[in-house]
Amino acid sequence: MSDLKIRVVLNGYGVIGKRVADAVAAQDDMLLVGIADVVSDWRIKVAVEKGYPVFASTSEAVDGMRVAGIPLRGTLDDLLERVDVVADCTPKGIGAKNLKHYREHGVKAVFQGGEEHSLTEHSFVAQANYESALGRDATRVVSCNTTSIVRTLSALKIAGLLKKARGVLIRRATDPWESDHSGVMNTVVPETTIPSHQGPDAQTVDPELDVVTIAVVAAHTNSHLHAWSVELTREVTREEVLAAFRAAPRIAFLRASDGVVALNSTLELMADLGRPRGDMWEVGLWEDSLTVKGNELFYNYQVYNQAIVVPETVDAIRALYGIEREGSKSIARTDQALGIVREFIERRK
Amino acid sequence: MSDLKIRVVLNGYGVIGKRVADAVAAQDDMLLVGIADVVSDWRIKVAVEKGYPVFASTSEAVDGMRVAGIPLRGTLDDLLERVDVVADCTPKGIGAKNLKHYREHGVKAVFQGGEEHSLTEHSFVAQANYESALGRDATRVVSCNTTSIVRTLSALKIAGLLKKARGVLIRRATDPWESDHSGVMNTVVPETTIPSHQGPDAQTVDPELDVVTIAVVAAHTNSHLHAWSVELTREVTREEVLAAFRAAPRIAFLRASDGVVALNSTLELMADLGRPRGDMWEVGLWEDSLTVKGNELFYNYQVYNQAIVVPETVDAIRALYGIEREGSKSIARTDQALGIVREFIERRK
Amino acid sequence: MSDLKIRVVLNGYGVIGKRVADAVAAQDDMLLVGIADVVSDWRIKVAVEKGYPVFASTSEAVDGMRVAGIPLRGTLDDLLERVDVVADCTPKGIGAKNLKHYREHGVKAVFQGGEEHSLTEHSFVAQANYESALGRDATRVVSCNTTSIVRTLSALKIAGLLKKARGVLIRRATDPWESDHSGVMNTVVPETTIPSHQGPDAQTVDPELDVVTIAVVAAHTNSHLHAWSVELTREVTREEVLAAFRAAPRIAFLRASDGVVALNSTLELMADLGRPRGDMWEVGLWEDSLTVKGNELFYNYQVYNQAIVVPETVDAIRALYGIEREGSKSIARTDQALGIVREFIERRK
Amino acid sequence: MSDLKIRVVLNGYGVIGKRVADAVAAQDDMLLVGIADVVSDWRIKVAVEKGYPVFASTSEAVDGMRVAGIPLRGTLDDLLERVDVVADCTPKGIGAKNLKHYREHGVKAVFQGGEEHSLTEHSFVAQANYESALGRDATRVVSCNTTSIVRTLSALKIAGLLKKARGVLIRRATDPWESDHSGVMNTVVPETTIPSHQGPDAQTVDPELDVVTIAVVAAHTNSHLHAWSVELTREVTREEVLAAFRAAPRIAFLRASDGVVALNSTLELMADLGRPRGDMWEVGLWEDSLTVKGNELFYNYQVYNQAIVVPETVDAIRALYGIEREGSKSIARTDQALGIVREFIERRK
């Protein structure tokens, strides 16, 4: 049966990459042939423990990994000979150097949002433009924040409600596991350029979006918070807006009335739900504070930056390979495999 | 000469109160007759060190303060017999209980933003409505965030530019000195109600302002950051907007190009400038990230919540007493005495 | 078969309680008959989602829980009629009020370290005094920090190495999910009493331990760090000390040489290993910084306060019920069921 | 009169350097001839505002500083021609490169603790070894933590009480003004080597000290906290220990009973006392938690790393120049000029 599956390699087993590896392994139409990296510490040792075939991304990394006791199966080049798609989750800028190499091996490639749109000339959010990726040899899944923007604004656009959107992004400072002096402490750092890059970046997926973003970095690590002021095409009821969001995939509701009142309480909920690594792949939108005032709409949502792009990456692999022609079917397939929901807790009343 | 001065008592020597005490003492038309509080720890002991006459706010507090070695001059009631105005900086809700008492003694009173507008039916920001406080027996200086909103939006309004303003307030979680488990850690907590109270609160000062605020609490202690999206009455140049802000008092510019890039770097600058307690009384508005796009305006500013209302409180005392009929003259007098500026660092190019 | 199992109720489904519930459910000699609480928010709703029979801890809580849509099976009193042991994980001080009630129902009870030793006159750490709990009707699992102290110092004592131990405990400020202003920010708060209570508390388990602790609270949420200076009975090699720790249960090694260099990198490792909620039940002892100098020993370890007492609670249930007479066998059984290890990552060299 | 003063240049106007500049300017036997740096942002612009003659540390820096509008008086080389001593507060490692240069100009030099002992073969703490620096052409003021260790242990040693000392140092993660991703967040990072370098570093000042340190970095910025376990030469009373500390310079007492309970409450006290930048030059030792048990002593103290070495640097300048032969007289002179105290708040009972 495995010859009917998309053969995938994961290059860059970091915060995003390790989740993409697990997600690919969970799809019944994909085969994770191997993972590649250059590190030799606990991160890659866990991959070995989990049974993933481990390869060195570069020949330079081989010795260090062997000395550290990593049972290498070979190098990325060996892998590229026998896969269909590479999910490149290497650090910002490295991916750009890899594309030529992938093309030389005739392997399609999905990049992450750290790379520029110009690298592949296609930026991907499944619900917005899955079909436009069919037949391409590469695409870029946009960053966590941009993904959330496209998901939510697309929902409003499809419902015919969106005029323009102005958002403030309160970003996490560094990843939760980082202890190598990469954080910001007891401060907020506003980005010096307005609009911040996420607004224009959303337009690489959908040029019609009228969106401006202001971004700041705050003194926490676990996820991002967005606060949006949206001008609608007309006066609507709050229920119409909620219906628009409910109709879109990968948006789920958080409720302060349930005691889910902050970024960290959401994440405790995810952990309690038994999700792997406590991941939230959905945009977590606070339902009870969503407010409509005339033709204006205001809301907050949470972006769990470590995982939100994982389902998009899975869909992008499927789109490039072309095994599934309809985005909505790929989304449904991915979401089923990962356990993505519309409601985190069943409504019982 | 002292009989020509406004005789002031400070009730509530906390984070705001201690700064108001110093600011009143620095005015040449005011006499700080005494300060009153109920605590008996280092905070009030420092007031003794500084030479302030210390009184007990309540008779219940007398014994504890005496036992702690505080040389009491009497109680607040003794003080009220011989002052003109009380600056009430007691904790939220306490002030409301005090007003009747002050009135019984025929003493005028300035309250802080923790109290409701309904307490005095007058809310005060010097540059917006100084004159309307003349002749009243009480007013309320609005909160730090609301003060900043009125200062900046008034500036745009006076220039004929303001249509509507939508702001996101990233608030500090607790005061820097607090160690009694009052903080929020490694999270952001969005307020569950939109608009947050600051927008409507600004309208208690100027009902014409079309303003909506979304507030969140972030994981830092030192000050607030605001991010604003403003719709202007017309398309303007960036320089017109800057001129409008420059024409208003108590707004000063921060510049990322000078390396002042975050809440904490601003505060290091204030400390380096030798300001008492490192205070910033001005709205610190980032000049270089202020952006105009058609008839839209975007900007960030910093609100140093511990001190921004101090000059307003001084002006409010002056307005209630009626010694100065023009707001602009009171503002100039206060600002001169405190060292409030338009530029933190002289422009040399 | 279920009539051969210990019938257990969990009272207090909080940070510890929810983990104890899962751990009890994972034991093949225990049956989790139900869980009881008084809250009606997401925390208990997740318990419903997980399929646990939910009861109200008090009759006063019934209405609120029903209104919130919690499908209640009854009250704690109903439960007590048909269980053998209650694991009481209610907040500090509540447990003390419950004991009389449990005794009236003839139900044995395990309390947590928030309660005083005097409540049950027996304090429990499995490897130190399992057997002394046999036949009792109640015991108290000591707190997370005390548990770690007894585990590590017992290991040294059994090896005949321990003379006296002086430790500094760097505690987390509040739980990771808490957003209700219970944190401490940008500071360290030393406890005003030396020794802090953990040293004497360890002596309630083993009065022979010569141990003094100094405790501080630092500005993080995820776990505690201990730094110890130990005087040994004689000069030893580092390998002898490591062997003593390796011979003891529930101590596992962390290695900076593997890149596990801080509290948060450990927790990322736990999440990557697929542990439920990312829990670490073991004392995580840094092997490579453990230092022996003459007859002195220095080391650091991490205490994951949310989970470390979970296996002890399971053992305590078993000891009270008497189904297993030997501590080492209960420990082995618990550890097997939970997945407790001696090495987090297999050594391959 | 100025020809009777020590002519000093400050090289490196950073966190330490700007404070040293102010402290030198405050001494009546010193003349601050100029300050030198390479930066061109707000930090150096404030120096201009304060009226300090500003020079470029390197010729490479001249253009950038001029472009930024800094009115340069010349370069460091120009300065070296006409000064006696340079206080080198440049970043770690830079000082080492400068020494040869200073010697070529015949200028004596004081370095900071970022440099190695081997650079000058003399490490300085005024109360321990002032006299041994007389006649030297260079010395190194040890780091903040090491300075505090030598101050406190010297006090015990002089009183004949010190046998051996074991300390845990809870360090701040980055400086308060830093926003350039240099922090550690929501974690504690233990140093991988025990003893940490501070213990051996204290022995470069006094080789007789039997001291071992364990260091960790915690998630705060404002200062360090030390927790010590000391073995004394004999059983003593608590009062004897307090007397030993009281007899030593630059140690002052904090009291939890006064409400000064944590690093941040201390710093609020310093700001309230009107100290420049809220600095604490003294070791802040918590009196009420200091505990004696037989021949063991336990205590906590706070090290305000931004300022504690400032008075030592002033004394070191004086020692190198030789204008004052007795350390105690230099210490008294420095302390008088800066406002260093033994009690932060006068005891009134």
Image (tube, coloured by chain):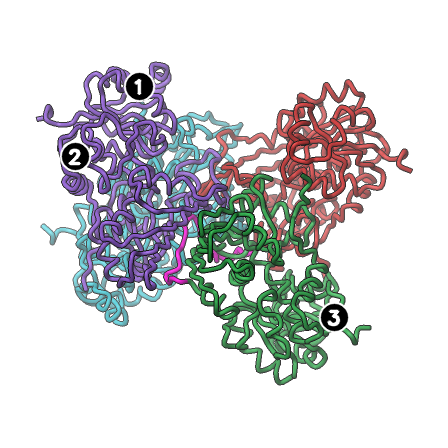
Chain colours: A cyan, B red, C purple, D green
The residue that disc 3 covers is: D31
Give the magenta-colored segment's residue range.
D177-195
Query: Is residue D182 on the magenta stretch?
Result: yes
Do callouts 1 and 2 point to residues on the same chain?
yes
**Which label sits in the foreground, 3 or 1?**
1
Q: Quadrant of residue D260?
A: top right
The reply, left or right, for residue A332 in relation to residue D134 is left
Residue sitting at x 60%, y 32%: B198
The chain carrying label 2 is C
Amino acid type assigned to the residue bearing label 2 in the image: Gln
Quadrant location, the C terminus of chain D: top right
Q: Quadrant of residue A35?
A: bottom left
Residue C278: percent from the left, percent from the top? 29, 44
Q: Is any part of residue B162 visible from this angle?
A: no
Q: Which mark is residue C100?
A: 1
Quadrant location, the N terminus of chain D: bottom right
Residue C173: percent from the left, percent from the top? 44, 41
Q: Secondary structure at mark 2?
A: loop
Amino acid type assigned to the residue bearing label 3 in the image: Leu
Front residue (pair D170, D44)? D170
Q: Is any part of residue A327 visible from this angle?
A: yes
Front residue (pair B41, D270)? B41
Do callouts 3 and 2 point to residues on the same chain?
no
Residue sitting at x 62%, y 63%: D310
Q: Which mark is residue C27?
A: 2
